[in-house]
Amino acid sequence: MKAALQNYQARMRRVLDYIDRHLDSDLDLETVSGVAAFSKFHFHRQFTATFGLSVHRYVQLARMKRASHRLAYMDAQSVTDIAMDAGYDAPDAFARAFRQRFRPIAFVVPEVSRLGAVACGLRASRQREEQAHAEDFYH
């Protein structure tokens, strides 16, 4: 009995690793269930029972986590590019999903989207830090 449980756990770890390495790929149920060597129906039931959410939802959240990191730390990418990379067809759909998931703090000017304000705030903060470091360096 214990060996069977360890086998299932190893398969699920293999699936999570695969998903993390292939976030840019099409991660449909058939592909991911193949990594676990289960039928797609059995795999979907086992994944949901093990993690408490569907494979599709897990992939969405993993992509959103990656997108939040890119928003915070990669100035070169636009919000639109990050939204498209996360699998969203439009920036407004991404903004709604991001808002629902992360619930940004409410320091937003009403006519500016929360997502845009958070991204602008992070960039402005980083620019101030860079300017302070540059002033310290040259003085």
Image (tube, rainbow, N blue to C red):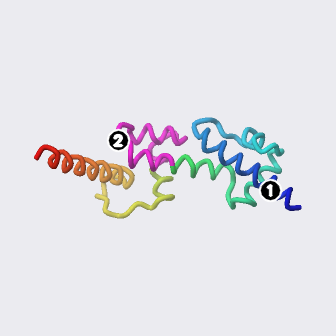
Q: Which mark is residue 74?
A: none
Question: At label 2, which amino acid type do we have?
Answer: Asp
Task: Name the chief secondary structure element in magenta.
Answer: helix
Q: Can you identify the residue that label 2 sits on?
A: 75
- Closer to us: mark 2 or mark 1? 1
Q: Is residue 112 left or right of residue 103?
A: left
Residue at the (57%, 37%) spot, across then down:
24
Residue at the (61%, 40%) spot, across then down:
21
Q: In the figure, 121 relative to 78: above or below?
A: below
Question: At label 1, which amino acid type do we have?
Answer: Gln
Q: Can you identify the residue that label 1 sits on?
A: 6
Relative image position of residue 4 (x, y in whole percent) = 86, 56
* Name of the residue lying farthest toward the left: 139
Q: In the figure, 37 relative to 107: above or below?
A: above
Q: Nearer the viewer, residue 124 or 12?
A: 12
Residue at the (78%, 40%) spot, across then down:
34
Residue 88 painted magenta: yes
Q: Nearer the viewer, residue 14 or 95?
A: 14
